[in-house]
Image (cartoon, rainbow, N blue to C red):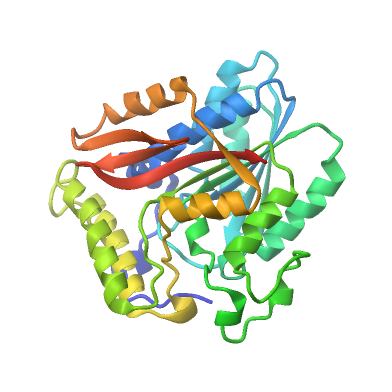
Amino acid sequence: MENAHCNLAIDTHKFSIIELASFVDLTPWHRFGYTAANAAILEAVEGYLVIHIVDLSLTHCMQIPTLIDAIANRFEVPPLIKLTVAGATEDVPPLLDLSYEELGSKLVNFALSRNIILEFRVIPSSYADGFSSFIEQLRVQHLVYAESGEALVINCHMMLHYIPEETLSGMPGTNSNTYSYESSSSSMSFRTMFLKSLRSLDPTLVVLVDEDADLTSNNLVCRLRSAFNYLWIPYDTVDTFLPRGSRQRQWYEADICWKIENVIAHEGPQRVERLEPKCRWIERMRNANFRGISFAEDAISEVKTMLDEHAAGWGLKKEDDDIVLTWKGHNVVFASAWLPA
């Protein structure tokens, strides 16, 4: 299933690696999650000789080079890194002008330059069915390497909200058997089954980073109100770092327009921007038998240092075990870390 879009800027522009790296560095929107997640991952994998990172990220592994650098600087004996990436079959911005095979080759070479062996694997999969084929491949790998003592890290960066949150009984024409989780039923959603399947892999750490908003209502008026109350933020921030008429600003605004169009003009499986607020994700993770852990003070300090590089309106607050990126006091993105309960 491919989404139809009227916005030609998003349809035609694909970022080069350099353009995308520069684009995601413009604001803390993504860097906040990268920084928090990498700090939590480094702490969790201390002492492991093999680290398997499962990257479910919207930004095409842009987080990974910094993580490789940090591992190279921290470990006396460089570990083997296995990187498994979900290659989504649908087009969701930002788009990349590089195949994942080419991207993997660049990451492998970058890791070698840091004296680290990196094994890269991409698994074509679809968020529309809860990454079911991806989960099946991970389950096979888990059976093969369960006794090897490798660390398994699941890094979820702004990708899980594309998994349908509706129960299967509310999704016309959906066959719950397409997701082979042993407890699946029509009363569960792909989102719930995905998290339960992650738990069955007994990961060393799960990091969940996403935007803190609610765009799931079936009522258009409610959805429009929620979108207005959240999507003013990226428009408000743009004047602090991009001049009007610049190419990067056109790409940035086209990305927001894509979200608005998808939230308002689409229904059913075509409406994929289905953000849930932090409180609902916490409930989902706990129901899947995960327990939250706090970010270390070093991690929070790193995030604060990163925020100092950006406009004064950005802030950080701690809510229980989680940390939240704010703009002028409004929640924007949350980061959370989880262990099997």
The image shows residue 168 at horizontal and vertical percentages of 61, 76
The image shows residue 159 at horizontal and vertical percentages of 50, 55
Residue nearest the viewer, comparing 283 with 42? 283
Q: Is residue 134 left or right of residue 210?
A: right
Q: Residue furthest top?
A: 76
Location of residue 133 by image quarter: bottom right
* Identity of the residue drawn at 70% across and 56% down: 197
Q: From the viewer's perspective, is residue 42 above or below residue 101?
A: above
The image shows residue 15 at horizontal and vertical percentages of 39, 53
Q: Is residue 241 left or right of residue 18?
A: left
Location of residue 48 by image quarter: top right
Q: From the viewer's perspective, is residue 50 above or below residue 243?
A: above
The image shows residue 110 at horizontal and vertical percentages of 57, 32
* Identity of the residue drawn at 36% across and 75% down: 5
Residue 14, visible in the rendered structure: yes
Q: Is residue 182 left or right of residue 168?
A: right
Image quarter where the C terminus lies is top right
Residue nearest the viewer, comparing 38 with 187? 187
Residue nearest the viewer, comparing 180 with 281? 281
